Image (tube, rainbow, N blue to C red):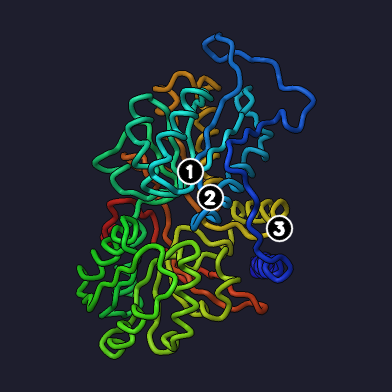
Amino acid sequence: MKTSRTAFLILVVLTFALSPLVASCASDSATTTSAAATETSAPAATETSGGGAAGPVKIGFMAPYVGVYAKLGQDMDKGFKLYLEEIGYKAAGREIQLITEDTEAKPELGPTKANKLIDSDKVNVIAGIVHSGVATAIRDIVDQKKIPTVITNAGAPDLTGKLKSPYIFRTSFANGQQDLAGGWYAYNKLGYKKVIILAPDYSAGHDKATGFMKYFKGSGGIVVQEIYPPLETNDFASYLTQIADKADQVDAVWAFFAGSGSIKLINQYAEYGLKDRLPLISVGDTVDDAFLPSMKDSALGIKNYLHYAATLDTPENKAFVDAYKAKYNELPSMFAEQAYVGAKAIVTALEAVQGNIEDVDAYTAALRTVKFEAPRGPFSFDANQNVIENVYIREVQNVGGQPLNFVLDTVKDVDQNWTPTQ
């Protein structure tokens, strides 16, 4: 096993060494992908188990392909399509068509895009969505029109909480979910007793910070200061000055930023001289493998937590990483894995109802019971249709001259309402 694990990690390192991270190009307009794209003709209509003629199953995929979250959307697109390609864009005797819409991560565009997919394109399922504002904006639309929706990133907790719908599922996380375990672990295992909180001033930033603080403070920890810069912050100097002024009063800084903001934060934290003075502990989004090439040595040593790591040594993850590298010439990010899992969940439920996705009640009932070994580990939904998953305590390490996240420990079976007694 040791030889096999070493060989896998060497392959992971070589991927970074030989392949620079390149963002894929994408059009602002809707695109459609299906098995027919690689065949001379589309398959003839089949019949569902109910005996009716069945055309293709249509999936509407909503993601940002431009803007600060473009990389996240592009990675989700890649992961989702990879799974559909693995099954030849067919399941349960039916062709699958994928129709993509660029949300630009703008909540005001969400309803327009969702209505277009539902009313004009006649999709059976909606998937994707990076931005919680977009997901919240389409909540009532998919609920009222009874469109099964599988969110593969947006973490607004209410969507699987007080605003839950029988038609909304999530394969990524609820904001604050992993942070419940992260805060507990920071105090009880890493020994941090006093911290400064640093997160963007929008819903996800506050939700994640609240999750971290719940069991950090509940265990006896003290939050000395909370700092919430604007989401689009490029220059962190004034906030880092505040941290430097209190560096002798705390044990660590907890931080969350995503997208291009995370790269700026981590690099500036090191440039400001704080890296060697005050440890950072972060949500894994902040030091996702997709961003590490742009952070280089600035990220080394940062402990973080997430539900996925490309270096996980499991058969399912090895197969996923190998397939993703072969197609895209880079390692999969958390966003790619979340979408890959989302696609598999959609298809697994489709097979369970023998292709009869038009029976929405039966289909959503099947979706609620989906369980499988994902690249991240065991996957299933809780009673509110939010994912239950392991949370991995990780550290950015230099292996073969490349920074990568390696798993140090695991907190198992973390759901949206996790408590340390579980």
Q: Which residue lies furthest to the right in this view?
A: 40
Q: Nearer the viewer, residue 50 or 279?
A: 279
Give percent across and percent down for residue 218: 20, 68
Q: Residue 309 carries which label?
A: none
The three-letter amino acid code for the residue at tag 1 is Thr
Q: Distance between the residues labelled 2 and 3?
A: 17 Å
Give percent across and percent down for residue 33: 65, 34
Q: Which residue is drawn at 31% across and 51% down?
A: 416
Q: How far apart are marks 1 and 2 (CA)?
A: 9 Å
Give the residue at mark 3.
Answer: 329
The three-letter amino acid code for the residue at tag 3 is Asn
Give the residue at mark 1.
Answer: 103
Q: Quick check: marks 1 and 3 in contact, CB under 8 Å?
A: no
Q: Which residue is drawn at 60% across and 13% down?
A: 47
Q: Distance between the residues labelled 1 and 3?
A: 26 Å
The vertical placement of 350 against 301, above or below, is: above
Q: Quick check: marks 1 and 2 in contact, CB under 8 Å?
A: yes
Crowdedness near tag 2: few (<14), some (14–19) or many (≥20) residues, C-alpha within 10 Å: many
Give the residue at mark 2.
Answer: 73
Mark before the other along the chain sequence, 1 or 2: 2
The vertical placement of 220 against 204, above or below, is: below
Mark before the other along the chain sequence, 2 or 3: 2
The three-letter amino acid code for the residue at tag 2 is Gly
Q: Of the residues tagged 1 and 2, which is closer to the observer?
A: 1
Q: Can residue 297 be seen in this view?
A: yes
Q: Residue at x 50, y 38 (%)?
A: 345
Crowdedness near tag 3: few (<14), some (14–19) or many (≥20) residues, C-alpha within 10 Å: some
